[in-house]
């Protein structure tokens, strides 16, 4: 049987320290993914980086790499308040954000597939908008459930009129060819 501290405050502090350490490890892992995919360190002060972080983590979770974040719909697509909180806490107090995580073989495989299919987007300085579209399509398809192609294009275009129907359709096709996400469209 474990020897637990007698003082309740000490127990609570111990639990908080354990949770903080787990959150720190999780965000360090995310930091490594961001660095690998984008090719540079995350910058907390940049809105586009915060947006990009949200979309990349959502996409990775949909690709089977679980970080344990819950996402809901927000103005720019899927958003996790928990991820935002963890990012502000980690990047706000850490002085260096160099990658410190070794990817598993399955994670390396997923990264290679994403890089193969989205390398152009990863290297584009305006990539946050492109990832906003990808993450929004994935969210509306899987969280809202079972829209067919036409309906999904219509919904995304209504929510995000800055994207043309053709751009939305091309992105759906690109998502489907990655074979890292479940197919986004269904046969009608």
Image (spheres, grey):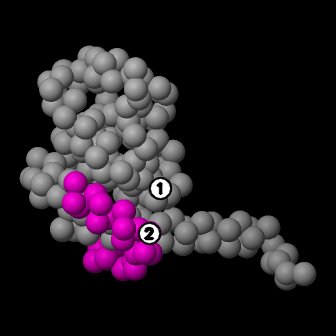
Residue 110 included in the magenta stretch of the image: yes
Q: Residue 86's x, y, as percent? A: 44, 58
Q: Is residue 10 left or right of residue 187?
A: right
Question: Position of 5 compared to 146: left or right?
Answer: right
Of the pair 14 and 52, the residue shown nearer to us: 52
Q: Nearer the viewer, residue 7 or 121?
A: 121
Mark pair 2, 1: CA separation = 9 Å
Q: Judge whether 156 appears above or below 1 on screen.
A: above
Up-down relation of residue 57 to residue 73 (above or below):
below
Tell me the SS state at disc 1: loop
Which one is earlier in the sequence, the residue at label 2 or at label 1? Answer: 1
Q: Which residues are magenta?
A: 91-117
Residue drawn at the location 41% of the way across and 29% of the way down: 186
Percent from the top left, x then y, of residue 105?
Answer: 43, 75
Few, some or many residues within 10 Å of mark 1 (<14, 14–19, 20+): some
Task: Say if mark 2 contacts mark 1, CB within 8 Å.
Answer: yes
Furthest residue in direction left, as rendered: 125
Mark count: 2
> Is residue 111 covered in magenta?
yes
User: Residue at label 1?
Assistant: 64
Q: Residue at x 48, y 33 (%)?
A: 143
Task: Find the residue positioned furthest to the right.
Answer: 1
Q: Identify the residue at image location x=34%, y=17%.
A: 151
Question: Can residue 155 be seen in this snapshot?
Answer: no
Which residue in the protein does label 2 denote? 106
Q: Residue furthest front?
A: 187
Q: Residues within 10 Å of mark 2 (few under 14, many from 20)?
A: few
Residue 174 seen in the current view: yes
Residue 169, which numbered label?
A: none
The quarter of the rendered structure image containing the N terminus is: bottom right
Residue 62 placement (x, y as % from top left)? 43, 48
Q: Quadrant of the C terminus?
A: top left
């Amino acid at each position: 049987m474990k020897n637990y501290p007698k003082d309740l405050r000490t127990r609570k502090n111990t639990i908080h320290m354990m949770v903080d350490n787990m959150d720190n490890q999780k965000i360090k892992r995310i930091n490594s993914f961001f660095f690998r995919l984008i090719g540079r360190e995350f910058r907390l002060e940049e809105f586009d980086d915060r947006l990009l972080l949200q979309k990349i983590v959502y996409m990775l979770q949909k690709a089977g790499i679980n970080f344990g974040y819950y996402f809901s719909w927000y103005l720019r697509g899927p958003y996790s308040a928990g991820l935002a909180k963890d990012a502000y806490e980690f990047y706000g107090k850490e002085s260096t954000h160099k990658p410190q995580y070794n990817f598993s073989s399955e994670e390396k495989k997923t990264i290679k597939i994403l890089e193969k299919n989205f390398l152009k987007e990863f290297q584009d300085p305006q990539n946050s908008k492109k990832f906003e579209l990808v993450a929004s399509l994935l969210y509306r398809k899987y969280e809202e459930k079972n829209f067919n192609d036409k309906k999904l294009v219509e919904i995304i275009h209504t929510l995000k009129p800055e994207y043309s129907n053709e751009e939305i359709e091309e992105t759906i096709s690109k998502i489907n060819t990655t074979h890292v996400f479940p197919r986004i469209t269904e046969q009608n």
